[in-house]
Image (tube, rainbow, N blue to C red):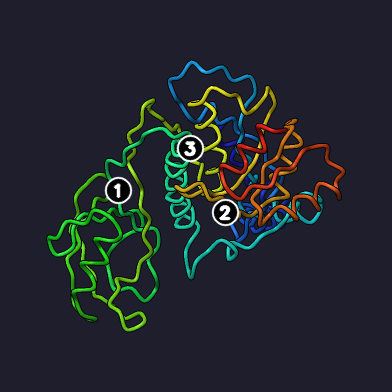
Amino acid sequence: MLNKLYEYIKKDIKQNYKGYIIFLLIVPWLFITFDYNIYAPGGLIDLGDRIEIDTNNKIDGSFNMTYVSAKKGILPAILLSYIIPSWDLVSLDESRIEEENEDEIIKRNQIYLKETSYDAIIAAFKEANMAYEIENINLTVSYIFEEAKTNLELGDIIKKVNNTKITDYKSLQETIKKLKIGDVINITVNRNNKIIETSATLIESNNTPVIGISLTELKDIKTNPEVKYIFKNNESGASRGLMCALEIYNKITEYDLTKGDIISGTGTIDENGKVGAISGIKYKLSGAVKKGAKVFIVPSENYEEALKYKKEKKYDIEIIEANTLHNVIEKLKNR
C-alpha cells in the first residue's frame, strides 16, 4: 500500500514539477507582511461594555467609541486595496517615530490608551464637580530616541534615579538638572511587574542634560463610585478619551445625555477636558453611519473634514463639534 502511494507521488511530481515549483515560489509571498496597513471603515464599541461604574442612573441610549479597521499589509490585502474603494493602503511611516517597528508602535499606543482613559476619569469628575484622588503616578517610558544611550525599554516605569525616588515628571526633571552631560545614572524601573536596575548616559539637548526618552504619566485614580476599565489586548490609541469621559459623566450624573440614541464619536482628552485632534475621520464616520449612530462627535480640528465627507457621501447623521468636554455636554443637552 505504501509502495503504491510512494510510486504515485513520485510519478505525479515528475509530471507536474513545474507547477509545484511555481506554487512554492508564490505561496510564501501571500503571507509576508510588508511595511503597510490597509485601513477600512470600522464600527462602534459600546463603552458600557468597557467601563464599569456602580450607579443606578437610568441610561436609555449608548456612548460609543469609533474605530478604524486596520489589516496587516500582506500581499492579498494590498492587491485588494486597489480594487475595493473603501480600502486605503497606508505606509506605517505615517504612525512611526524614527525607526520604530510595528510592535513598538502598538506598545506606545497602548500606553497612550491608558493615559487618555485615566485623564477621562479626571475630566468627567471635574465636570461633575465630584471628588477624586490621584493616588499614584507611574512615570512610563513611551519612546526611546535613537541617540539615547540607555538600556531602558518601552513601558518601563521609572521608580528611582541614583536612589532618588521619582514620583512624577517634575521630580525627574529636578533630579536630572543637577547632573551634567555625560554623567552615567542608575535608573530603577518596574518592568513587567519586576524591579530592574538599568542605566543611561546623559546626552545633550539644547545645552541641557537629558536621557533621550519620552515619558507619559499614568495615574492611579481613586473615585467614588469606582471606575473600572475593561481593555482588550488589541485595543490601543488615545482617540477614545472624549467618549470615555462622556460615558463616565453620563453614569455619575442623573441627566441622560444620550436621550435614547446611539451616540458615537472620537477625540483625545486631557484631564482639564480639552479635546484633541485624531486621524482616520472618514473610516470612523463611515463605521458610525453603518452601525446606525444618530450623532457623531468630532474634535474641532477634524470638524470640517467630517462635514465634507458627510456631504460627499450623503450621510444622515448629526455631527457635533468638540473643543472641550463641557462644550460637548451642553450641545448634547440642547439637541
Q: Do labels 2 and 1 touch, CB within 8 Å?
A: no
Q: Nearer the viewer, residue 320 or 311?
A: 320
Q: Amino acid at mark 1?
A: Ile
Q: What residue sits 54% from the left and 26% below the top? A: 48
Q: What residue sits 46% from the left and 19% below the top? A: 55
For the C terminus, which image quadrant?
top right
Q: Is residue 176 above or below residue 319?
A: below
For the N terminus, which image quadrant?
top right
Q: What residue sits 75% from the left and 55% below the top? A: 304
Please name which of the two marks, 2 or 3, marks the residue nearer to the observer: 3
User: Which secondary structure lies at badge 1?
Assistant: strand
The tag on residue 137 is 1
Residue that label 3 marks:
124
- Give the image location of residue 184, x and y in percent: 18, 74
Q: Nearer the viewer, residue 122 or 310?
A: 122
- Give the image location of residue 191, x and y in percent: 27, 51
User: Which secondary structure lies at badge 3?
Assistant: helix
The tag on residue 276 is 2
Q: Nearer the viewer, residue 21 or 56?
A: 56
Q: Earlier in the sequence, mark 2 or mark 1?
A: 1
